[in-house]
Amino acid sequence: MKNKLILIGFMGSGKTTVSEYLARHYQCEVLDTDKWIEQKESLKVSEIFTAHGEEYFRNLETKCLEFLTDEEKDIIIATGGGLPLREENRLLLRSIGQIIYLEASADEIFTRLKDDKSRPLLNTSNQQEKINELIKIRRPIYGSIANLTIETDGKTCEEISKEIISAQIGRFYAKHPR
């Protein structure tokens, strides 16, 4: 069943905020993979990284996707920025639903996240350089699996969401007309 919309993109691209807007529009639930993991582990993402390392966290992301493959409810899914890096996860994402890539420039990401201390991968002396490095690696991966790419720079959550809604993504939209 592919009645799920999946938002992917770099951290700070708007996945969580847009997913909540879309869920209100489509009158369905949101599952944020990072929040799902935090609930299962009773730890914040940053604490998981510190206590167990990135590989452990990435394994938890895969477990979350495996859970979602059996979920029959219509749902909007906001993924963590690194979730699509594993090939296994990309295959799972494709089997779960329609994938929407929220693309933001490195400068926009830096502006949004420069004061955010909750991002383990950005706890470095040169955040801009780290963002550039990670985006260079991740952008082609995101683009390769997306059914739709939405540029988010300079746009509000409502504008981004309306672009997604107007694209009438697959059966999800047909099942939830407005």
Image (cartoon, grey):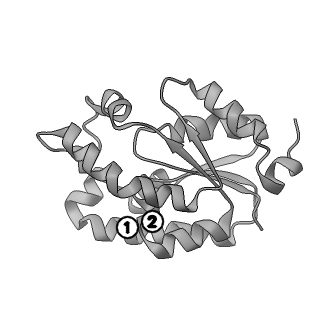
| Left or right for 84, reference 132 | right
The answer to whether 18 is drawn above or below residue 172 in the figure is above
Residue toward you, 43 or 23? 23
| Left or right for 4, reference 81 | right
Q: In the structure shown, which secondary structural element does the residue marked by tag 1 occupy?
A: helix
| Residue 172 percent location from the top left of the image | 80, 52
Residue 18 in sight = yes
Which residue corresponds to the image point at 34% horizontal and 49% vertical from the top-left? 135
> Dot 2 corresponds to which residue?
61
Q: Determine the CA span between mark 1 and mark 2.
A: 5 Å
Which residue corresponds to the image point at 19% horizontal and 44% vertical from the top-left? 123
| Left or right for 98, reference 57 | right
Which residue corresponds to the image point at 33% horizontal and 31% vertical from the top-left? 107
Amino acid residing under circle 1: Arg
Q: Which mark is residue 58?
A: 1
Quadrant the N terminus occupies: bottom right
View extreme (bottom): residue: 88
Residue toward you, 27 or 111? 111
Is the residue marked by circle 1 packed among few (<14), some (14-19), or many (20+) residues within 10 Å? some
Residue 44 in sight = no
